[in-house]
Amino acid sequence: MSEVRPRRPSTGGKAPTKVRVHLAIEEAPSHDGTPCFSIWRYHDSLHLPEEWPPVTPPASQRPKRALQIYDTTPGSDDPVHLKALAETLYGKLDMCNLDEDTRIDVWGMPLPLEAPDEDRVAKCHAHSKVEIVWRKIDSDGEFRMPPRKFVPQWHRVMLIIDRPMTQWDEDEGGSLSVGWDPRIGYLQEQAGWGNYDVVPERRPISYDRRQVTEELECLVYSLSG
């Protein structure tokens, strides 16, 4: 017996519209000129031939939520490097069925390879605090950096790349996930356990190449809501 295939739903006599999905990479503003590229997905619903170039991404489709990633390796302020890194990291998230409501902002803030993690975290943290305020007030509200929704401990998070990707599997990995700006509820909970005085302003956790995709997915999810 031949297989009976389901019929395609009717379009009411109209030609079906093919939605094309594109990747936007654009230079983002910064309060101090630190290079930053924002990467996100968008779609156009125009019935255009596949060979046509993508339309310019409208600012109205730019996601409001954003994950902040700082590359602190030498030469990370090179625009070509930053764009390639943004595509690589976004590609890891795209495999996790990333929606179109989140973008990634990738910053180039080069430091010496021998710089201690404490210095990397402190510099990126200080920069991010000022950038959050500046983007909200002085950049017409574009490229905002909202707090997380679904994580009980920290309002904010950033990912810091502390060594070239070729070395991510060595020792303690090549990236630091840094939570900061503790929530009041978290502080109260720790105070109840007698730990109020030991809650740090920020808390870094190291990840290697094998773990970074899962961590990226978790960080993006924590921005949703």
Image (cartoon, helix red, strand yellow):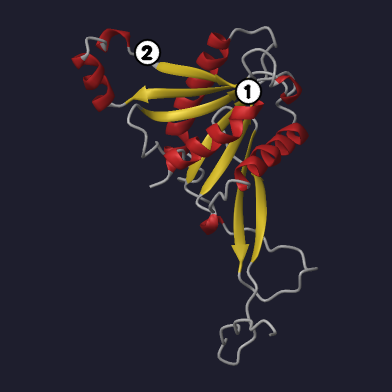
| 217 with respect to 106 (left or right) | left
Where in the figure is residue 106, as x and y percent of width and height?
62, 34
Q: Is residue 139 visible?
A: no
Q: Which residue is mark 2?
A: 200
Element under disc 2: loop
Q: Earlier in the sequence, mark 1 or mark 2?
A: 2
Labelled disc at residue 185: none
Q: Residues within 10 Å of mark 1 (few under 14, many from 20)?
A: some
Choose top left, top right, bottom left or bottom right for residue 170.
Answer: top right
Element under disc 1: loop
Q: Residue most toward the right? A: 51
Name the residue located 53 percent from the left edge and 57 percent from the top edge. Answer: 61
The type of residue carrying mark 2 is Pro
In the image, residue 135 sits, relative to residue 46, either above or below, namely above
| 11 with respect to 157 (left or right) | right
Labelled disc at residue 208: 1
Choose top left, top right, bottom left or bottom right for residue 146.
Answer: top left
Q: Residue most toward the bottom? A: 13
In the image, residue 91 sits, relative to residue 74, either above or below, namely below
In the image, residue 62 sits, relative to residue 72, either above or below, namely below
The type of residue carrying mark 1 is Asp
Q: Is residue 154 visible?
A: yes
Q: CA distance from mark 1 to mark 2?
A: 23 Å
